[in-house]
Amino acid sequence: MSGKAMKRYTVSLAGQDRELMVPAGNVAAEITFTDFPALPNLLEAFSDALEHPIGCAQLSAHLRPGAKVAIPVGSRVTDWMLGVRHNLGILLLDYLNRVGVRDEDVTILYAAGLHAIHKVQERFGEALLRRVRLVAHDPRDEANLAYCGVTSRGTPVWVNRIVAEADVVLGFGEISPTVQGGWCGGGKIILPGVAGKDTIETNHALSLAPPHTLFLADRNPMRLDMEEAADLAGLTMKVDILINSREEIVALYAGDFRKEHRAALPMARQIWLTKMAPTDIAVVYPNETRERYLSRSLFGCLEASDWGTRENGTIILVLSAAGGWAPPEEIPGESCGPEIFKLSLEELARRIVRKQGYVRGTVMLYTAKRVLSRKRVILVSDGISHGDAKEFGFAHSIRSFDKALSVAFGQHGPDATISMNLTRGVGWRCGPWIED
């Protein structure tokens, strides 16, 4: 690389800025997050969306005095937007009151699926919770689950009984990329949001079939299965938002959960994805919080880089792994240890279909291991031993980024094209432009 003009990139490793130098002429793509301005009048946009939904009748047409209303709410940013951030929940309750639905007939469900539940009361806020009942969904509490039938892919559907018995189910969520389901939003508020553990695990086993699930909706069997489950559970209407890097709402969609979701995806792609041709080499950095733990750095990053590299491409994963495999505060039974990631792809698949251990976590490791099995992945990290990296399936474990890049050039030649995915904060969700 001597004599070549270099381009400087900065990442944060264990709290310290580190420079990555890359030949400027080889950089063919830089994956970025696109910010849009916040909606100028959010409350007006919210009311308008409810009265002019996409693909279904307006919300008021579904309501009557005395109707039982269930409002499952996502667990990433939409909980506090319904609550303390924007008080959209107050606006929604006032709307329901005007058509005769009393506050006591409304239940908000914290739809976290198998995710851990944190600071729920704090995020919804006292003003909202003085008026309405809040229930944190527990997918393991079988006594409070109702059976709704079986999807065409064989997933038995149990959902929270409050949802199953409601007259109207109005979901509230956010759309961004996710390995499981391709994109958040739409019917995903039901499965995994308010589904039972057995339903979630059976659905997640569908990740074994396709080579990719990330960034896909209509070609994603997991997503399509989730949507069938939402049909069986009776999801009446869905509200989904798109946000910018400051977690401000930039667009809002409401209506039939399939139609509003697909209507939102063109703008979602503009926000999260970058138009580019596949490159020989992909350099990827998770973000400043995920990079401290290897387990958290695998999800999404590798699959996005798989999409963005040619068939024989090389992925360079840069992180500190200063905390090792995973945070010590992770709840036992809610994560997979490093010994699971050392299993072969076949052994991981067997654990998934047999529902051994924490299936959702095993599915995430399976998708990462699948990339390791078909692409050359170089780990650049101080926190993972060479022996462990080899057992995990990395092609190389190298402490120096410069050396890792040199190895990649040795495999692809001096004119190899490079894509850089180093976006901080939201970077682990960003990727190359993929259409269904």
Image: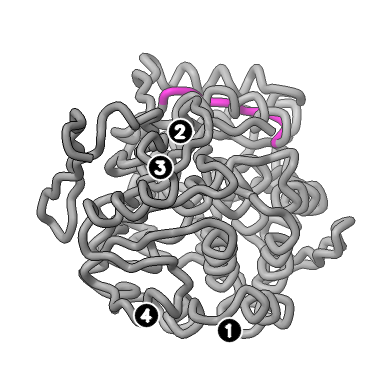
Above or below 382: residue 112: above
CB atoms at circles 1 and 2 under 8 Å apart?
Answer: no
Q: Residues within 10 Å of mark 2 (few under 14, many from 20)?
A: many
Instruction: Please state which of the two labelled residues, at mark 3 or mark 4, is closer to the viewer.
Output: 3
Q: In this view, does 157 lie to the left or right of 328?
A: right
Residue placed under numbered mark 4 in the picture: 388
Q: Give the range drawn in magenta.
A: 250-257
Q: Which of 353 and 332 is in front in this view?
A: 353
Give the x, y percent position of residue 148. Answer: 83, 61
Which numbered dot is residue 413?
3
Give the x, y percent position of residue 59. Answer: 68, 28
Q: The residue under label 2 is which amino acid type?
A: Trp
CB atoms at circles 3 and 4 under 8 Å apart?
Answer: no
Which numbered dot is residue 272?
2
Residue 355 shows in the view: yes
* Residue at disc 4, secondary structure: helix
Q: Pick the quarter of the image with the C terminus.
A: top right
Residue at image point 67% right, 22% down: 53
Looking at the image, how many numbered discs can be counted on the residues?
4
Disc 3/disc 4 C-alpha distance (Å): 29 Å
Disc 3/disc 1 C-alpha distance (Å): 43 Å
Q: Main secondary structure of the magenta part?
A: strand
